[in-house]
Image: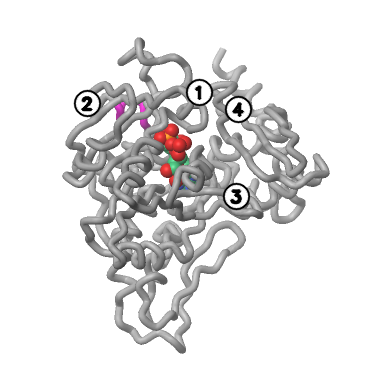
Amino acid sequence: MMTLFEKKEQCCGCGACAAVCPAGAITLVSDGRFSYPRIDEAKCVGCGKCAAVCAFKLPKDETPNCLAAYAVKAPKAVRTASASGGAFTLLSDAVFAMGGAVYGAAFDDTMRVVHARARDAAGRDRMRGSKYVRSDTAGVYAQIKADLAAGIPVLFTGTPCQVSAVKAACGENDLLYTVDLICHGPASPEIWRRFVLLLEEKYGNRVTDFSFRNKAVSWREYSPEVTFADGGTAGANDLTGSFTEVFRYELCLAPSCAACRYASCHREGDVTIGDFWGVEKVFPELDDGAGVSAVMVNTDKGKKLWKTAAGAEVVPCSWEQIAAGQANMKKSAVPSPDSENFYRLCEEKGIKKALAAYTRTGWKRRTKDVVKGLLRR
Ligand SMILES: Cc1cc2nc3c(=O)[nH]c(=O)nc-3n(C[C@H](O)[C@H](O)[C@H](O)COP(=O)(O)OP(=O)(O)OC[C@H]3O[C@@H](n4cnc5c(N)ncnc54)[C@H](O)[C@@H]3O)c2cc1C
């Protein structure tokens, strides 16, 4: 019987193991917070393919592999609809121009975050914007393999662990381009599901979209905006802003994110993208408050992809200038000491009580802030 992991820290739930299992013996099952692979002993043929694709069995690589780095600003209209400087749109346009398919994270009809496939700008635009929730990649590996087999160039974008999984599950292929995000770890899909239900209860309306970073307000502030089925919207308030706090205070990180093997200057993607935090110090002339992307080109394939991603203001820099503003290129995110209590309260008393207790608007967080302030004096 195969053992894929002993502790949850050793599994990021990427599903590469399930994708390569020739017997269909592995399914991903939620523990109520995140999903983990479960092997059906009756079906397992003991071939070991699942363990062979598991990146967590390899040592962490900390060797820098960036070949070229840039500060990038797509045209303003693109940036307004994107989380950072719009690098994803430039890269996906380059792949559409090759006749390719783009894979990225989007909301489905029930507001679950899932990896979707797009063949045109309209489909791709649903992937714009950061969704700070672990996305479900079920079925995506098979779709990518089918595209590659049909000679269709593919761009896969996602967290570094997802990119690593796609490369392991689909194998080396000249037509497969990958873009990883600088990542500090997505939140639990189950907590997100409960949060969406709470929004729907409070507003008496179905949620159809959620922007974690409404650029009309700010690039830096992570200001939320909810869209409802009747076309109405709700901007930042104690409730809509509370999920961002859950994410930023690391209240519901996956155990593997706290031991992230990709929190490193060795990058998984052909290209890496993120926010160019600190751009105001390095290139103040670029900072118009609407977002600047950090782009690192890490492979020859990445060079080819980036060369064709035209239509932007591009300023060469060093990867060290990018890493200076990125804690998660050096070390994993640290879960909040309140994390377990937050989860428990959520599971036992409901998300409304957990948010009230542990986000800044909640009394526990407010008390902590006051105590911290007093100690700092
Ligand atoms: C969980 C998470 C943590 C992040 N942490 C950091 C960080 O610490 N530092 C930093 O500089 N940047 C971080 N980012 C990346 C940043 O927020 C932007 O997504 C990135 O700069 C791309 O912006 P853009 O303007 O080029 O693209 P946009 O047009 O906004 O496109 C968004 C891109 O992100 C992908 N994406 C969105 N949500 C998810 C998701 N849940 N899972 C996988 N892929 C997703 C889409 O597929 C698309 O490729 C994080 C993103 C996520 C999703």
The span from disc 1 to disc 2 (Cα, nearest Å) is 22 Å
The span from disc 4 to disc 1 (Cα, nearest Å) is 8 Å
Which picture quadrant has residue 292? top left
The span from disc 3 to disc 2 (Cα, nearest Å) is 39 Å
* Of callouts 3 and 2, the N-terminal one: 2
Per the image, the residue denoted by label 3 is: 340
Residue 283 position in % (x across, y down) = 32, 14
* Of callouts 1 and 2, the N-terminal one: 1
Residue 371 appearing in the image: yes
143, 335: nearer the viewer: 143
Q: Amino acid at mark 1?
A: Arg
Please report the bounds of the magenta region as a residue range. 322-326
The numbered dot on residue 318 is 2
Q: Is residue 60 above or below residue 216?
A: below
Q: Amino acid at mark 3?
A: Glu
Q: Is residue 107 magenta?
A: no
Q: Amino acid at mark 4?
A: Ser
Q: Residues within 10 Å of mark 1 (few under 14, many from 20)?
A: some
Tell me what residue is drawn at x 36 percent, y 80 percent.
Answer: 22
Q: Residues within 10 Å of mark 2 (few under 14, many from 20)?
A: some
Per the image, the residue denoted by label 1 is: 220
Secondary element under disc 2, as helix, strand or loop, is: loop
Q: In the image, which is nearer the foreground, mark 3 or mark 2?
A: 2
